[in-house]
Amino acid sequence: MARTIAGVLASDPGYQAVLAHQDFDALREPANSGLQTLELSGAFRESLSRAFSGAQAVVCTIADARLPDVAEIAQASGCHYVDIAEDPSIAQLVASRAQEQSCVVPACGLAPGYVTALAGEMLARSGEDADLAVRVGVLPAKRSNRLGYGLMWSIDGLITEYTAPCLAIRGGKLAKLDPLQELEEVSLAGEAFEAFTTAGSLDGLMRHQVGRVENLIFKTLRYPGHLDYMRFLIHDLGLGRRLYQLRNLLMNGLPAVSEDRVIISLVLQPKSGQGEEHFLQTITASRDGAGNPQSAVSIATAAHTASVVDIVCSGLAPHKGFLDHGELPPALLRRSGFFTPLIGESAAR
């Protein structure tokens, strides 16, 4: 993702994107493709401070506990800070340490991120006491196994989604739901899917909307039958208590998938007597200018992240300090040229 986001930013002559990493070998291929690279050497904090000197913004794509430290060093260096954190507890910690001298936007990408902004924009025009159901799936373009899944994104993020408590709003109050529950059969554009509760994707929006909406729930979309197999692994075999074994099983057993698709469905039911509002969007995999395959989830993640960087660097953000995705709605993000992949004929209301 670091390489993809750097490539998107570097496509605009107004930006000079530098891809930094501690491993020289990891930088060789991006450098050969024309990206500017920087090998980090020495102690962690000192190497980052040197790298961030003179930069306007830092985009962090690591997925571990060092993320809050990177955010702190970026702000101390006078940089705006953006990341693609999947762990809601880490994103909350980054937000709690935000200073007022620059913009801090954790958890960019698909969900949280783009979908959060979509849901917030829909709720903003619905009035109070509305019901909103959000369903999102990252799926292989074609089903090739019984699980209907493959290696497309972070397995660690997937395991967190499938095993951590899920936030929702029920009756205007914040509620914690168990993951892998409340199975629904869903038909979207004539195709059958299943949807069930998963954790982390809209936690920030849930906390922000408590008392403002009647019901708000997030569910993951999968091909039919996926949930039964995952319940068998996590519950019946007890791998929910041995997550390292579950991780090894999925990493070694699932096929790599480059042809994926992202499906986003939002259904809003206002309480004011207005009719239901539907939003359905499909983002498909493609190829970049050099002919390299680009997965749908990486396209969506890079487009949202680069758009957020563009907005904060252009001075269009509503304020400095921590920025919730509800404060960066699609109407604002569309002012960035990087947002174009998220605007298409596949989006409909």
Image (cartoon, rainbow, N blue to C red):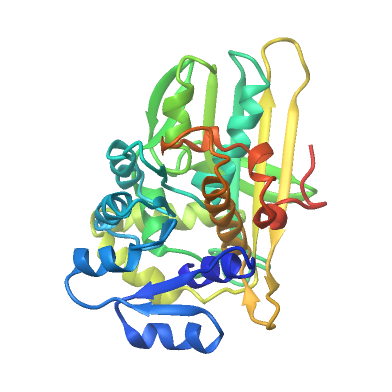
- Residue 303 horizontal/vertical position (percent): 61, 57
Relative depth, front residue between 342 and 102: 102
Q: How many marks?
A: 0
Relative depth, front residue between 325 and 190: 325
Q: Quadrant of the C terminus?
A: top right
Q: Quadrant of residue 148?
A: bottom right
**Residue found at the far right of this picture:** 345
- Residue 301 horizontal/vertical position (percent): 55, 57
- Which residue is painted at 65% across and 72% down in the image? 259
- Which residue is painted at 79% across and 51% down in the image? 346
**Residue found at the far left of this picture:** 43
**Residue found at the far top of this picture:** 272
Q: Quadrant of residue 122?
A: top right
Relative depth, front residue between 258 and 330: 330
Specify whether residue 74 is in view.
yes
Q: Determine whether 300 is above or below 202 in the image.
A: below
- Residue 46 horizontal/vertical position (percent): 20, 66
- Residue 183 horizontal/vertical position (percent): 54, 40
Left or right, 150 with reference to 95: right
Q: Determine whether 173 is above or below 194 in the image.
A: above
**Residue found at the far front of this picture:** 54
Specify whether residue 238 is in view.
no
- Which residue is painted at 29% across and 57% down in the image? 70
